[in-house]
Image: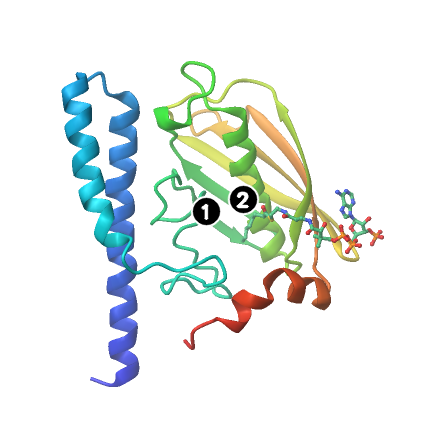
Amino acid sequence: MTDSVQSVDRLTARREAIADLGDALRELIEHATATEAPAEELIRAAELVRQAAAPLGERIRDRSQLAAADDLLGGVRMYNPVIGSGSAIAPPVRIEAAGGVATGACTLGLAYEGPPMYAHGGVSAMLLDQMLGHAVTTSGNPGMTVRLDTSYRRPVPLHTPLRLTAEVTQVDGRRVTAIGAIATAETPDDALVTATGLFVALRADQAQRLFGPVMRNRRPA
Ligand SMILES: CCCCCCCC(=O)SCCNC(=O)CCNC(=O)[C@H](O)C(C)(C)COP(=O)(O)OP(=O)(O)OC[C@H]1O[C@@H](n2cnc3c(N)ncnc32)[C@H](O)[C@@H]1OP(=O)(O)O
């Protein structure tokens, strides 16, 4: 087996392990949020969780280093808080995007509760920011959100399959506008939350100022 095949195999195995840990963490969070277990059980669980966390903290990266399993330019972000399969706080949303249009699917658990039974408004805004970002990136005009206007028309139900959509509506030099919506999968035409986002493509000097350390620390593929 060649070195490059071995390194691809190692990367695949690492990403699968990260996703498996992510699944376990999400299960932990959902159970920890929903549990009505007695205090002794909570104390015992806290002890076990701390025991599990300790070895993970022995080799860590700082914020100027990408995760070894990430591929920034290839769009792989294992710990992204919306789509990252390794993120404990990501639902995660499964997104498909091409040509400035994105669709996504997820189900939100009790950890995302704002009003009883429904999602926190900040969570909806986070999901839509990500959706719009994918639409903008696949339009060929990647940029950063500078403005996000969100309209909450109906509450977003928890434990209900959701359908998310986004599309680019305007490209004006470095400024790109996109719109998006959250609906239930059952009634995808009835928007519960809508958003309009303005994204700005970075000038080279801005990209260097904001992301210079990360790009310098990038590991060879
Ligand atoms: C696939 C990946 C999906 C990822 C999805 C997630 C996306 C995100 O969440 S990104 C994170 C959140 N966003 C940020 O942190 C961005 C913070 N903002 C910044 O750093 C800066 O505003 C930056 C660098 C983007 C732009 O710099 P800034 O100096 O503000 O703007 P500048 O470069 O001078 O101007 C560009 C244009 O944008 C306009 N603009 C900038 N901010 C705004 C705003 N808030 N509202 C309206 N227009 C604005 C300017 O007026 C200017 O317009 P024009 O070209 O007509 O003069």
In x, y percent, where is residue 207?
Answer: 66, 63
Asked if the residue at tag 1 contacts the one at tag 2, i.e. Cβ–Cβ closer than 8 Å, the answer is yes
Q: Which SS class for mark 1? A: strand
Q: Residue at x 16, y 37 (%)?
A: 48
Q: Which SS class for mark 2? A: helix
- Per the image, the residue denoted by label 2 is 130
Using the image, determine if residue 192 lies above or below residue 210. above
The figure's colour scheme reads rainbow
The label nearer to you, 2 versus 1, is 2
- Is residue 142 in view? yes
Using the image, determine if residue 187 lies above or below residue 172. above
Question: What mark, if any, has residue 183 been given in the picture?
Answer: none
Which quarter of the image is occupied by the N terminus?
bottom left
201 sits to left or right of 70: right
How packed mark 2 is, by other alpha carbons closer than 10 Å (few <14, some 14-19, many 20 or more), is: many
Type of amino acid at the residue the image marks with label 2: Gln
Q: Does any atom of ligand 1 lie closer than 8 Å to the CB of label 2?
A: yes
Q: Quadrant of residue 131?
A: top right
Question: What mark, if any, has residue 95 been given in the picture?
Answer: 1
Q: Residue at x 38, y 32 (%)?
A: 107
In x, y percent, where is residue 120?
Answer: 49, 24
Type of amino acid at the residue the image marks with label 1: Ile
Give the alpha-carbon distance from disc 2 to disc 1, as whole Å: 9 Å
Q: Sequence order check: which comes first, mark 2 or mark 1?
A: 1
